[in-house]
Image: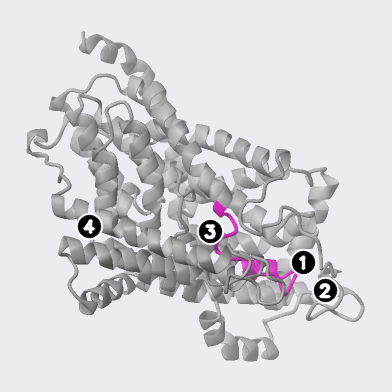
Amino acid sequence: MSQNPQAESTPQKQQANGWFSKFLGVVEWLGNLLPHPITLFALFCIFIILFSGVAEFFGMSVPDPRPEGAKGREADGIIEVISLFSAEGLRRIVTGLVTNFTGFAPLGTVLVALLGVSVAEHSGLLSAAMRSLVMGASKRMVTVTIVFAGVVSNTASELGYVVLIPMAAMIFHSLGRHPLAGLAAAFAGVSAGYSANLLLGTVDPLLSGITETAAQMIDPGYAVGPEVNWYFMFVSTFLIAIMGTFVTEKIVEPRLGPYNDEEASIDLGAQTMEQITDQERKGLRMAGLSFLVLGVLLALTIVPEWGILRHPETGEVAGSPFLKGIVAFIFITFAIPGFVYGRVAGTMKNDRDVIDAMSKSMGTMGMYIVLVFFAAQFVAFFKWTNLGTVMAVKGAALLQMMGLDGPMVFVFFIMICGMVNLSLGSASAQWAVTAPIFVPMLMLIGYAPETIQAAYRIGDSVTNVITPMMSYFGLILAVACRYKKDLGIGTLIATMLPYSILFFVGWTLLFYLWVFVFGLPVGPGAATYYTPG
């Protein structure tokens, strides 16, 4: 019985895999043409220097779209490209190299947030919470719980990839289900649902800092906080969990068919899953209690009209120290429960353990810091030369001429972000490249940076699971090969493509309904439309 469905589906699988193999061949070819993202930013910097010289020579300019009184406004209302390929340009580059780096908005905010997350991660709190959530789920709820846990795991970078995905495959196998379906469900939650979450994490200050810098090309005083997409991403968490469950149980698992242990490349009987110990459960309870206490204390600073973290002049939440200091609260709400868990569970004893956890996390950020150095130069050069503003004005005019200045422009924008993500997998690298162009461009046709960033996060997430350029793709492939020894890249992509398609359609539809039909803000104090001030 188990052999006939497999035999009947073989030609279809071979045909599908052949098509996907060709598709992947193109993606890999394009990806391999690109140098390392750090090298790419260095080359972009050189290109901007040279191109700005050519553009200034030919007198490239546009009418100044910025509000009256904006800094740097020319007397005649014209913005011209300024050359860096000159003596003055060289002086500016040399003197600004360090301050470009140290003043780059995402650098400090991401590192501060990560310090708090590192305590929760290294104490074992996040791992224990994930295992407790997934392993405690009923058979009926196991799929949705795994996808949901995958989305939530994004708070701590690689935790979902390293812990949850292998564990999901083992759980599915132990339930007599196909282990690759469990792997796919977890992978979809962790990677295709990358930007959604219930809590603010390190990705929020990372993206908002880049968005703010790009928005200031049009409006120098514009501020974008890490919390500006929280409402939309909170709701998106549940949508991703529902869609991921549907694809797993109705499309992926039936397509995979019955599983035969002989397909595995390892001894499946030797696999073990770490159960939650009594000490860990106690630690989770105490960590949860400390989180609740912190939540109440923070609420007292902002909910009452007399809250000390409300705006000191207006008394409003908008523009308040609470929102401006949200990164500090991310740090606190992860670090304190993390240490409480560590003390109770026995994984942390004193301040030295906390410091060691923070130090280890900072030690893993070397590549990111190097990337930020070159990305910061690229963004600064774009701003100095006025190329970003010029391209934004011309792009906005083109969109209006084509009649693409309505909400439908975001469908194309999300598609473009998804396509770019196929070859440039890093979220920070991709947004650092695209934000200086698209944020000012879409601002000029009337949309707020917060809304633009929310749309970007959809495109950046949904294609993560179908690109070999994603940094953890090799790890996922290695885990999958444990259960199917002859599995190739094409098969893995074919398995994950339905998630990518449905997530793109469903998430984009939610965005359209949320923003343009119901008129809801994507986050606290976030505007939908941009009005020059």
Q: Residue at x 61, y 54 (%)?
A: 523
Q: Residue at x 72, y 52 (%)?
A: 528
Could you tell which of marks 1 and 3 lies nearer the N-terminus?
1
Could you tell which of marks 1 and 2 lies nearer the N-terminus?
2
Q: Position of residue 143 (x, y in %)?
A: 34, 32
Residue 2 can be seen, yes or no? yes
Q: CA distance from mark 4 to mark 2?
A: 59 Å
Could you tell which of marks 4 and 1 lies nearer the N-terminus?
4
Indicate the quadrant where residue 483 lies: top left
Could you tell which of marks 4 and 2 lies nearer the N-terminus?
2
Check if residue 219 falls in the magenta segment: yes
- On the picture, is 119 further left or further right than 76? left
Marker disc for residue 283 = 4
Q: Position of residue 359 (x, y in %)?
A: 28, 76
Q: In terms of secondary structure, what is the magenta stretch mainly?
A: loop
Q: Which residue is mark 2?
A: 79
On-image quarter of the N terminus: top left
Could you tell which of marks 2 and 3 lies nearer the N-terminus?
2
Disc 2: CA contacts within 10 A as few (<14), some (14-19) or many (>=20): many
Disc 4 marks which amino acid? Gly
Magenta residues span 212-230
Pointers 1 and 2 in contact (C-beta within 8 Å): yes
Pointers 4 and 1 in contact (C-beta within 8 Å): no
- Disc 4 versus disc 1: nearer the observer: 4
Q: Which residue is mark 3?
A: 430
Name the secondary structure under disc 3: helix
Q: Which residue is mark 1?
A: 390
Name the secondary structure under disc 1: helix
Marker disc for residue 224 = none
Q: Is residue 171 above or below residue 471?
A: above
